[in-house]
Amino acid sequence: MAELDVKQLLSGTCLSSISPLSPLDSSEKFSGSHILSIIQFSRHDLDELLLVAGKMKLIVESVGMCDIARGSVMAVLFYESSTRTSSSFQVAMQRLGGQVLAINDISNSSVSKGETLEDTVKCLECYTNVIVLRHPELGAALRASKSLSTACLINAGDGVGEHPTQALLDLYTIQAELPAGRGLEGATITMLGDLKHGRTVHSLAKLLANYKNVKINYVSPEQLKMPKEIVEFVAEKSQGTIQQSEYSTLEKILQETDILYVTRIQRERFSQEIDYLAVANSYIITPQLLSQYGARSTLRILHPLPRVNEISPQLDSDPRAAYFRQMRYGLYVRMALLSWVLGKKLPENLGGTSNLNKGNYDTPQLASH
Ligand code: NCD
């Protein structure tokens, strides 16, 4: 996958011209910015975003919504199917008090008449403040962002490229689900499945490079390995403090794993069905497999969903299955991110950091750094 250059990414900044080295706080840094790649987020930004997401959780659980985005409109423009990403962005915007324009079926839009992506987003920019785009083509989000001048674009998946907001919600989930007192640093994260085509694991691996002493295991069939450029990016960015290893089975490493991140074999990315069939059902996580390989009681299983056959529904009631909670966390994270992009701050007096991190099971514990 071609790496997106951070300068190139930030040159798309639409409402403000903030450099990545700016000393501004994270909410100001992202105000009016396109969100195209996870590499735009520093360790500080990630910590800040999780704190805001924790506040969003309190809002949702106490009063359901706030109105900081009143007067703002978000478009969701999806050229690929989606249940969670599209609906959680829509609900996030509504719970911030903003409004939503949803284009989930492009066959009913002018795209079916041959309209270019550039023209479609330019049109939506006339009506909206932020456009959430999912597209099958690698780099489509960057390309679309270049034709915008007032609206911000959020990449909700660009083919086999990235899915930055999924990685942000995965981070929240990992922090929230690790045992109390355990930070991400020192944890072992095992990514399983289609690591070649899975944009969620591409973004997540890059995000983890912001943390020290994380161990990442990549488990996949030979033909679906994590792209070399991403492994190299993680090694370089973490200055070698992240140990990365590749395996073809879980057998030797499930026991040491804190977070098992399962992905679907991405059928739609194979040019020939026969190649997909050769790797379909490579891994199926069952309660029996967890016992056989000695999985910990504190293990947490994540999945961006949809699952096809890779996690048995028998596991859904196991407390180690975190994939449905993961979706819920995504709502808070997307609320937090939208508030930043729209330049809308929550009132200062809304819950202190200490309240948010104390005794609150599913609010992330932030590791000190
Ligand atoms: C993922 C995606 O679209 O990349 N789903 C999601 O956004 N939650 C994963 C997938 O489709 O397998």
Image: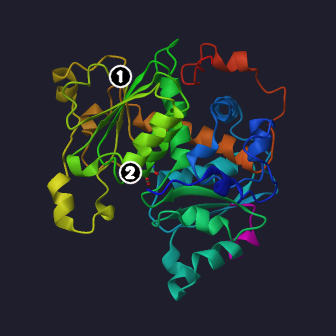
Q: Quadrant of residue 66?
A: top right
- 220 left or right of 349? left
- 168 left or right of 353? left
Can residue 58 be seen from the camera position used here? no
- Residue at horizontal 49 percent and vertical 52 percent from the top: 162
Q: Give the mark count.
A: 2
Residue behind label 2 places its C-beta within 8 angstroms of ligand 1: yes
Residues 346 and 202: in front is 202
The residue that mark 1 highlights is 299
Residues 100 and 284: in front is 284
- Residue at horizontal 36 percent and vertical 54 percent from the top: 197
Amino acid type, mark 1: Leu
Up-down relation of residue 89 to residue 105 (above or below): above
The residue that mark 2 highlights is 198
The magenta stretch is: 123-130
Query: Badge 2: few (under 14), some or many (20 or more) residues near its Cα, within 10 Å?
Result: many
Q: Quadrant of residue 140?
A: bottom right
Up-down relation of residue 130 to residue 48 (above or below): below
Q: x, y percentage for residue 17?
A: 81, 53
N-terminal of the pair, mark 2 or mark 1, is 2
Amino acid type, mark 2: Gly
Query: Badge 1: few (under 14), some or many (20 or more) residues near its Cα, within 10 Å?
Result: many
